[in-house]
Image: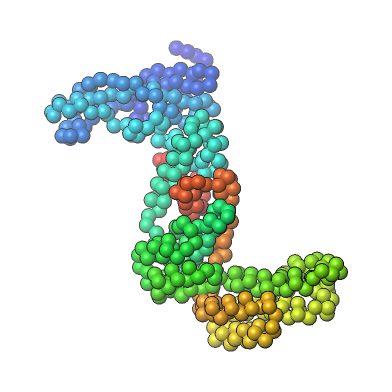
């Protein structure tokens, strides 16, 4: 008996090790299933008559940083009752698979934390296998979570997939903070198709979105009982955009004006409560030279304060005042804002009934951009969708732990 080695458990209890060999960069282990009899798939009778044996090459997880190759002695049995010849079950590896199930689950887990190529190179397998393992692992985890329950609050937002002008839409459950689905494009049809298949559609109380007309049409068609809520951050973003356009116009061609206004661009967009004393003094000096810029800045701040209210009736009266003031100012930059306040008036005011935002959805979209950059883009929409849905898991390793038991 060799006395200069230690035994490391393979931890595949169904298999019996017949021979093992450790080479420079890998292990070669001959194994066979421990069972002596199997059930015939045709008649259901137990038989132990062996018909023949075949040798199959399989790959398992690394052991001591060395690849493990298993030579499985695969047996075929002949049923003594119906005379059918059949192959014994292969629960460790799976039907027509050349790698163990636990190895594939490990590849799927690792492929979520780094690129497919790097995982394949580290484990000595093909990129296609890692990609399939990731997809299978996410699919099993999503299936284990069960059918998505219709939430009370939903968020819709588009994100860029590839330039130019290729977008997809993420549909999020704002109750649980999860991505419900990712649909191709940013049009009405795909979103409408998904929302129409939701169970208990009457349960949805409100849907948060930016001011994208196709989304509004899709919600009105499929969820007539839900209120549409314009995301407040998008509206304030439009107000900031108007303010910045006015600043750019006032810069003109004068070097003095251009330098002064350009250096003030961030201070103008900054919240009043976040300004330092020095910044307040500089803005005060700036407004003395540009009174129209001061009016636009005050309007921006009033919008921010307006959103902190809770009474819809008061908010509606205040919005009317905003609309009248914008209409009377005669600044060309404000025409677009006036149009938004008219066309989306009801949806903007719905925030005071259901104070929800797309903050979570925007956060997910940032996560999606990181996923896309890590992979240098996705050509397969199915793989991209699964990667995005996998972000629902708070802890990826925990999410896959039930697959390893």
Colour setup of the view? rainbow
Image height check: is 353 above or below 151?
below
Horizontally, residue 262 falls left or right of residue 188, namely: right
The tally of labels here is 0
Residue 84 rendering spot, x and y as whole percentages: 17, 28
Furthest residue toward front: 253
Q: Split into 4 quadrants, where in the image is the C terminus?
A: top left
Furthest residue toward left: 81
Residue 208 rendering spot, x and y as whole percentages: 51, 69
Q: Quadrant of residue 301?
A: bottom right
Residue 40 rendering spot, x and y as whole percentages: 20, 32
Q: Split into 4 quadrants, where in the image is the N terminus?
A: top left
Q: Residue at x 20, y 22 (%)?
A: 49
Q: Residue at x 38, y 51 (%)?
A: 143
Q: Quadrant of residue 114?
A: top right
Image height check: is 137 above or below 34?
below
Furthest residue toward top: 1
Q: Nearer the viewer, residue 50 or 360?
A: 360
Image height check: is 17 above or below 160?
above
Q: Residue at x 46, y 25 (%)?
A: 68
Q: Residue at x 13, y 29 (%)?
A: 82
């Amino acid at each position: 008996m060799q006395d200069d080695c230690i035994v490391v458990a393979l931890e595949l209890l169904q298999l019996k090790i017949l021979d093992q060999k450790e080479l420079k960069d890998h292990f070669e282990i001959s194994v066979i299933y421990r069972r002596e009899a199997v059930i015939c798939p045709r008649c259901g009778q137990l038989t132990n008559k062996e018909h023949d044996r075949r040798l199959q090459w399989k790959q398992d997880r690394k052991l001591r940083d060395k690849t493990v190759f298993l030579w499985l002695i695969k047996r075929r049995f002949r049923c003594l009752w119906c005379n059918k010849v059949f192959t014994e079950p292969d629960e460790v590896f799976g039907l027509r698979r050349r790698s163990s199930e636990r190895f594939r689950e490990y590849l799927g887990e690792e492929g979520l934390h780094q690129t497919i190529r790097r995982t394949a190179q580290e484990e000595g397998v093909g990129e296609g296998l890692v990609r399939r393992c990731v997809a299978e692992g996410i699919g099993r985890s999503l299936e284990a979570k069960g059918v998505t329950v219709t939430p009370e609050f939903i968020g819709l937002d588009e994100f860029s997939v590839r330039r130019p002008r290729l977008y997809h839409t993420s549909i999020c459950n704002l109750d649980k903070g999860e991505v419900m689905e990712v649909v191709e494009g940013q049009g009405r049809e795909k979103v409408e198709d998904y929302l129409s298949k939701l169970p208990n559609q009457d349960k949805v109380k409100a849907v948060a979105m930016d001011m994208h007309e196709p989304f509004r049409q899709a919600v009105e068609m499929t969820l007539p009982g839900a209120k549409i809520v314009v995301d407040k951050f998008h509206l304030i973003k439009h107000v900031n955009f108007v303010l910045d356009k006015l600043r750019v116009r006032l810069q003109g061609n004068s070097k003095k004006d251009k330098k002064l206004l350009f250096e003030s661009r961030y201070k103008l967009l900054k919240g009043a409560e976040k300004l330092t004393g020095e910044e307040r003094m500089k803005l005060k000096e700036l407004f003395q030279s540009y009174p129209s810029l001061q009016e636009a800045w005050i309007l921006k701040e009033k919008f921010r304060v307006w959103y902190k209210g809770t009474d819809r009736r008061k908010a509606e009266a205040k919005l009317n005042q905003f609309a009248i003031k914008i209409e009377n100012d005669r600044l060309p930059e404000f025409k677009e804002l006036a149009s938004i306040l008219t066309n989306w008036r009801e949806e903007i005011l719905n925030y005071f009934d259901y104070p929800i935002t797309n903050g979570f959805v925007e956060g997910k979209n940032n996560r999606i951009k990181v996923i896309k950059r890590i992979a240098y883009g996705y050509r397969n929409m199915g793989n991209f969708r699964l990667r995005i849905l996998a972000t629902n898991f708070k802890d990826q390793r925990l999410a896959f732990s039930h697959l390893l038991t």
